[in-house]
Amino acid sequence: MALIQVQSVSRNVATSDGELQILSELSFSIDRGEVVAVVGASGSGKSTLLSLLAGLDLPTTGQVVIDNVNLNDLDEEQRAILRGEKIGFIFQSFLLIQSLTALENVMLPAELAGRPNPEKEARELLAKVGLSERLTHYPNQLSGGEQQRVAIARAFIGQPQILFADEPTGNLDSKTGERVEALLFELNREFNTTLVVVTHDDKLAQRCDRILRLDAGQLVEQQHVA
């Protein structure tokens, strides 16, 4: 059974020149445990699609169904609860809280969820991403690659069913990006997460099970990677 179902989804926004269609009649599904890349030129609608899949926004027409729950049937608070229970995020710009240490940044989602041992879990995850020596460092004391590794640990601490990664290596040099990429796929296998990656990086896309290609808001290709 598909974990994510996108059915005839379009997204329009109002502009001073009238309505602009960002996504047009997209339909596809993503299976549990699948790793999918979403690719396309800037402005093709990739980030808009990600925000619809995560329930941060709703489609103008059509529906997104996550684990048999139609997001159109939920209000904003209910969608936030669903995100907290099922979804993790990794962003290009890391989005760490500057006033918290690496350990505190990773612990935060587990604390908010009322998990019994957030510090133990956070320490274990930071060890997995090779940052045991950086627990008490603040984001501004870490390199870009280290900050993204903290962000990956923070995303996995919630043990999400689905992980959305928006250009996860976009702010990193190629060598650091490759290390972060390897780590992301390794943890993804370990936790058996369904991973959806928005990327400009063809090499990263080729490591996924399937590639969805957007062009001017339309799904123009679905390619299974051998």
Image (cartoon, rainbow, N blue to C red):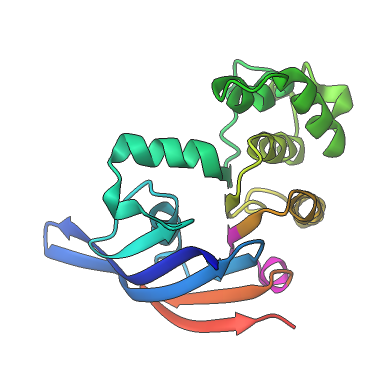
Nearer to us in this view, 80 or 177? 80
Res 216 seen here: no
Instruction: Residue 150 in the image: state x and y as whole percent.
Output: 72, 34
Above-or-below relation of 88 to 123: below
Looking at the image, which residue is at 64% across and 23% down?
A: 115
Instruction: Residue 132 in the image: state x and y as whole percent.
Output: 87, 26
Is residue 165 a member of the stretch shown in magenta?
A: no
Res 164 seen here: yes
Looking at the image, which residue is at 75% across and 34% down?
A: 143
Looking at the image, which residue is at 57% across and 43% down?
A: 88
Q: How many marks?
A: 0
Above-or-below relation of 209 to 139: below
Looking at the image, which residue is at 59% across and 27% down?
A: 109
Q: Is residue 86 left or right of residue 194?
A: left
Nearer to us in this view, 34 or 101? 34
In the rendered image, which quarter contains the C terminus?
A: bottom right
Instruction: Residue 188 in the image: state x and y as whole percent.
Output: 73, 53
In the rendered image, which quarter contains the N terminus?
A: bottom right
Q: Is residue 220 left or right of residue 63?
A: right
The quadrant in which residue 45 appears is: bottom left
Q: In this view, does 80 lie to the left or right of 14?
A: right
Nearer to us in this view, 164 or 47? 164
Above-or-below relation of 225 to 94: below
Instruction: Residue 137 in the image: state x and y as whole percent.
Output: 76, 19
Magenta highlight range:
196-206
